Image (tube, rainbow, N blue to C red):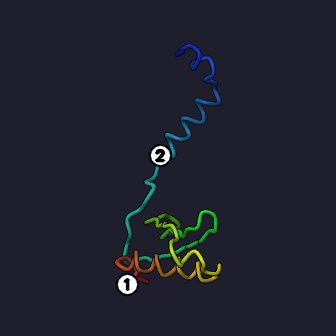
Amino acid sequence: MAANFSARWASACDVAFASIKRALMSAPVLTLPAPSKHFALVSDACEQPPAVGAVLLQDGHPVSFFSRKLSGPELNYSASDIEMLAVICVLREWRCYLEGAK
């Protein structure tokens, strides 16, 4: 079994694996929030599966992620109402970062 696996491992696999290791070691996935810097909030909603999500950014780096499924009456909301729901949800979630921030 091991010989079979090593036979399929090519030089392109080495390059891809090294690239993944470099990406994971070079910068953190999430950055720590700095209250003195500006925040950017990007939110989105989708119909299938019905959910809302967002990312909080500083200097183009993610600070926090948020997502949740829609339930109950929210499933009947219009697209614009779901988008607004996403904004309301993340403002509640990230109030500790955003209140008083730039």
Look at the picture and state if 64 lies above or below 88.
above
Residue hosting label 1: 99
Which residue is at the front of the view, 76 or 31?
76
Between the C-alphas of marks 1 and 2, the distance is 31 Å
Residue shown at the point (34%, 78%) measured from the top left: 96
Residue shown at the point (43%, 66%) measured from the top left: 64
Look at the picture and state if 91 lies above or below 25.
below
Side (left or right) of 5 relative to 21: right
Between discs 1 and 2, the one toward the N terminus: 2
Q: Quadrant of the C terminus?
A: bottom left
Q: Residues within 10 Å of mark 1 (few under 14, many from 20)?
A: few
> In the picture, residue 78 is in which quadrant?
bottom right
Residue 48, percent from left and from top:
63, 64
Side (left or right) of 45 relative to 90: right
Kind of residue sitting beneath label 1: Glu
> In the picture, residue 34 is in which quadrant?
bottom left
Look at the picture and state if 63 lies above or below 4.
below
> In the picture, residue 50 is in which quadrant?
bottom right
Give the structural element (helix, strand or loop) at label 1: loop
Q: Which mark is residue 24?
A: 2
Residue shown at the point (59%, 36%) measured from the top left: 16
Q: Which mark is residue 31?
A: none
Kind of residue sitting beneath label 2: Leu
Side (left or right) of 27 relative to 14: left
Residue 20, percent from left and from top:
53, 41
Which residue is at the front of the view, 98 or 32?
98
